[in-house]
Image: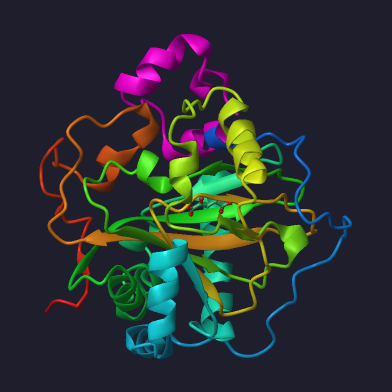
Amino acid sequence: MTDESALKPQDREAELSGEWTHDNQQWWNQYMASADNRVACAPEVAVEQNEAPKYIGSLPTIYDLQTELNASYELDPIAIGQFNRDGYVKLKQVISSGALALLRQEMEATLRDDLGENPKLDFRSGEMMWLTNNIFRQFVLSPRIAEIAAALMRVQRVRLYHDNSLAKEPGCGRTPWHYDAEHFPIDSNNVCTAWIPLQPIPQNMGPLAFAVGMETCRLVESVESSRFDTSYDRTVGKIFAEHGVDVDDGPFGLGEISFHHSRSFHTAGPNNMKSSRMVLATTYFEDGACVVPSPTMISGDWRKFMPGVDAGEPIRSRYNPVCFPREG
Ligand SMILES: O=C(O)CCC(=O)C(=O)O
């Protein structure tokens, strides 16, 4: 982490009322530094030094990719109930192994070009790659994925908030407990994120893990948010354990993706494998939603994701296209 982006106790007030003045990578650096890595990850797993399996076969063409990512997924109505009860759902076989391999190759190259080979950066992130890269564009604006998001939230039309390329490198620690509504400055209850792993994620690679229950967030609503130390992460974990909250920290198979509501509490374990845990996370919201009246520092780089949109205004900049139903 760079010194100038590290939040200090004197930033406390700004955290509540000011705006984030650094970039998105610095925001993630700050975020990851607020994880309590003394917490044992449940269940305990042996540290293994495995490689993720390599894709063998020819990669799809852009035409194949487009066809796959435009086609509807057969969503079981039970999944809609699960999402609304548990706050998240994991769906199998949403994306083919070839399409995932193609995006993984692209993400590796793009993050390397953008961030260099910095061994100190153990959680690398990128965003808005769909603006300049057609493979990212097919995924991020995919009607297949956005249609699932709309169905789960039971809304007619969804727009893109942002995409996030997330590479948790070997040796990177936990992702702290959090819920996204705290830092997405979107004034709506209909916001969700598709978390798309680009390789299988066994438990010792740090799969996204969910506190089961849409209302689980209420247990910790009085815990004071803090991103300049590990107290928030530690306290939330402790309260969930005391209340016997179920945590689904199961592995992800290849092609499996999760959708989590912005009120769903989630975390992720460390990456104890030898290869990078690469994920594309895309966030969608109900068309018509506005920016909250007073975004704060914890809302991060939000202005970049909706140029020209101000606090309180409807979010429909050119960077927030309607992804489902596909327009035009
Ligand atoms: O990938 C991670 O470890 C965290 C991602 C996350 O919190 C999210 O996409 O909402």
Residue 20 percent location from the top left of the image: 36, 27
Q: Position of residue 88 (x, y in %)?
A: 47, 64
Left or right of 106, for residue 234: right
Q: What is the magenta range?
A: 1-30
Question: Would you say residue 211 is visible in this rendering?
Answer: yes
Quarter of the image with the N terminus in it: top right
* Residue 22 is inside the magenta segment: yes
Using the image as rendered, state which of residue 226 and residue 194 is in the foreground: 226
- The residue lying furthest to the top in this view is 10
> Residue at image x 36%, y 54%?
128
Determine whether 9 is above or below 197 in the image.
above
How many marks the image carries: the answer is 0
Q: Is residue 70 above or below residue 21?
A: below
- Whether residue 259 is visible to the viewer of this picture, yes or no, is no
In the rendered structure, does residue 224 fall within the stretch colored magenta?
no
Image quadrant assignment for residue 152? bottom left
Observer-nearest residue: 281 or 1? 281
Please state the horizontal and vertical placement of residue 44, each as a whole percent of the image.
83, 54
Q: Residue at x 19, y 43 (%)?
A: 307
Residue at 54% across / 31% down in the picture? 30
Q: Residue 151: image x %, image y %?
A: 30, 76
Answer left or right for 308 relative to 111.
Answer: left
